[in-house]
Each structure stands twice: as C-alpha cells, then as structure tokens.
Image (tube, helix red, strand yellow):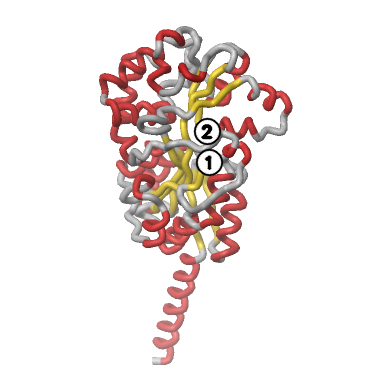
Amino acid sequence: MKLMSALIASAIATLTQTAVAEEKLLNLYSARHYQTDEALYANFTQQTGIKINRIEGKEDELLERIKNEGANSPADIFLTVDAARLAKAHELGLFAPVVSKTLESRIPPHLRAEDWFSFSTRARVIVYNKSAVKAEDVQNYDDLANPKLKGKLCSRSGSHPYNLSLMASIIAHQGEAKAEELARGMVANFARAPKGGDTDQIKAVSAGECGVTISNTYYVARLLRSTKPEELKLMEKVGIVWPNQTTTGAHINVSGGGMLKTAPNKESAVKFLEYLASDQAQRYFADGNNEWPAVDSVKVTNPGLESLGKFKADKLPVKNLAMYQTKAQIIFDRAGFK
C-alpha cells in the first residue's frame, strides 16, 4: 500500500512538474528577422518567466516545416509579415482560434481574423524624383498607369507578396477590370524590368534611373533615420506621397501571428499574443522596424515616421487581402508584370 501511495505521489509530482515546464516555455517560429525583436522577447521572459525557444526562417519554409511536423510539431506561435502569408497559414488549417478579451479589445477588428492578429502596420507609398515627376501627377495608385509616366516607373517583382497585396486591395475596391487596367498601364510605364527590393527602387528614383516607385513606409523611414551621409543625401532628392487620400486611403499591410492548433504550450502562447498587444511590446514590435502599432492608443516616437506626416489609411479588413491574392497574380501575369 505504501509502495502504491509512493508511486501515485511520484506520478502526481511528475505531472505537476510537466505542467509547470509547459507554462514556462514557448516555441516560436518566426519569419521576422529584425535585431530589435531581441529586446521584445527578452522583456517577455523577464515579465513572465517563460523561456522562448526561437526558430527563424523564410515564411514558406516555416509553414512547410509545421505541416511536415504535424501533430508532433513543437511550434506554439507562428509570426510573419504580410496578411496574405498569415491567411495562408489559416487556409492550411494551422492556426487555432484564440479566445482573449485582451486581444479583442486592443486589436481593431479590421486588423484581425478568426485565428490570427496583426501587431504592427505599414503603408505602401509613392516615392518620386522631385526633378523628374510632379507630386500632383502621382496622388493615387491609379496614376502609376498614366501614360505621362512612360519610361519612369520602377518596381520590385509582381510576384512579391507586397505588390500582390496591393493589387488585391485594388481588386477589392475597384474590381478585376480596373485592377488589370492598372497593371497593364504600370507595365507600359516601366523604366526597366522589375528587380530588387523596395530600397533598391528608392535609390534608383533618387539617382534618376527612374522617376517614381512604390515602397513600404518602413524602408523610407529606415533611410530617413540612416546615419550614413550618402543615404541621407539620396533622400533629399525624393518626395513621398500618401496615395488615395481622397478615396480609400493608403494601402495597409501588417506583421502578425497566431497560435498553432498543435501548440504544446497553449497557455504560454496566449500569454505571448496578449503580451504583443501590450503598450510596451507594441512599441518594441512596431518601432523596432519603423512601423506603426496595431493598438490605436499606443504612440511611438519615431523621427522617420513622424517626418512623413499624418495620413488616411485604408480600413479594408486585412484578411480580405488574401481573398484576391490568386486573382492578383493572374492579373500581373496576364499584364506581363513579372
């Protein structure tokens, strides 16, 4: 009898220790690659005592890994950039619904879905060469198709998620016909074949290789906050336009994440998501990459972003961007936007 009691006591102790261990651990799969996130994670561990095991990689690689690991996946949270990539995880059935009054009250409805949440936002703006293009000629995304810009437009690839999400928003607001008209007009205005990232486009505009481009705001803010004299000098030659201010507002995309269905540390996962919505974490999460917090009440002090001024943002639900991703790619392909 004593032996049986001892065995039961030992088993209970083991289960208790296991439960405690689960509460004190979080396995994070992240496609965010920003050094400033180190402070974000360290602060969470300091506040909660929950250790973060982090695996970083490209979005598709991490999603494939989670799929292959199946029910045995150690991943608790998947973080990434771009609403379409978050929606892809949802479509694959990887996310679990999270019931949290904290997240529902702090993250605006248009910045969350059934099972994932946005924690920072970025806008896609028009960047133009002050000597080659007039600001009044590039006030809207549709203006990029205007023949007066022939030979002046630079862009990254049409297959990149940032451009696909922008085109998805155009489809959502104006329909497929108008979206294809825009895509064909942009191709007709190319100064060169699409290549490079947003920073490359900004530099090309500054150098006069092209007259106008589109870019995510954090690339612009990063250059404006640069400590390199040559980068500050190149920014003196360009102007920034907030597009569609009299209509839908500037296109918005996000960074965000969700808890995985197979998460072994669900309590820790929910705590982490709620932490990302806290004032302190919002500042780390957003300002670290020159973005805006998803929580409206949180303010950040960022000279680069502040210099861009206030703007009207598109309130299209970010989960809707994924609805038109495939159509956006088809339209780009038909238009020859490679």
The residue at 46%/78% (across/down) is 13
Contact, mark 1 vs mark 2 (Cβ under 8 Å): yes
At x 51% / y 38%, what residue is drawn? 310
**Residue 236: horizontal and vertical position, in percent?**
65, 23
- For residue 336, side relative to residue 211 (left or right): left
> Is any atom of residue 88 visible in this view?
no
- Give the numbered dot on residue 138: none
Mark 2: secondary structure: helix
User: Which residue is more in the foreground, 50 or 262?
Assistant: 50
Circle 2 residue = 217
Question: Eyeballing the image, is 27 above or below 310?
Answer: below
What kind of residue is marked 2?
Answer: Thr
Look at 28% across and 26% down and name the residue there: 174
Q: Nearer the viewer, residue 100 or 6?
A: 100
Q: Sequence-wise, which precedes: disc 1 or disc 2? A: 2
Q: Give the position of the N terminus as an image quadrant.
A: bottom left
Does residue 130 appear to the left or right of 171 in the view shown? right
x and y, in percent, of residue 240 in the image: 54, 26
Characterize the local packing of mark 1: few (<14), some (14-19) or many (20 or more) Cα atoms within 10 angstroms.
many
Q: Position of residue 180 (x, y in %)?
A: 31, 18
Q: Residue at x 26, y 23 (%)?
A: 176
Q: Nearer the viewer, residue 108 or 275?
A: 108
Residue 274 image point, x, y percent = 45, 58
Residue type at mark 1: give it. Answer: Glu
Residue position for label 1? 291
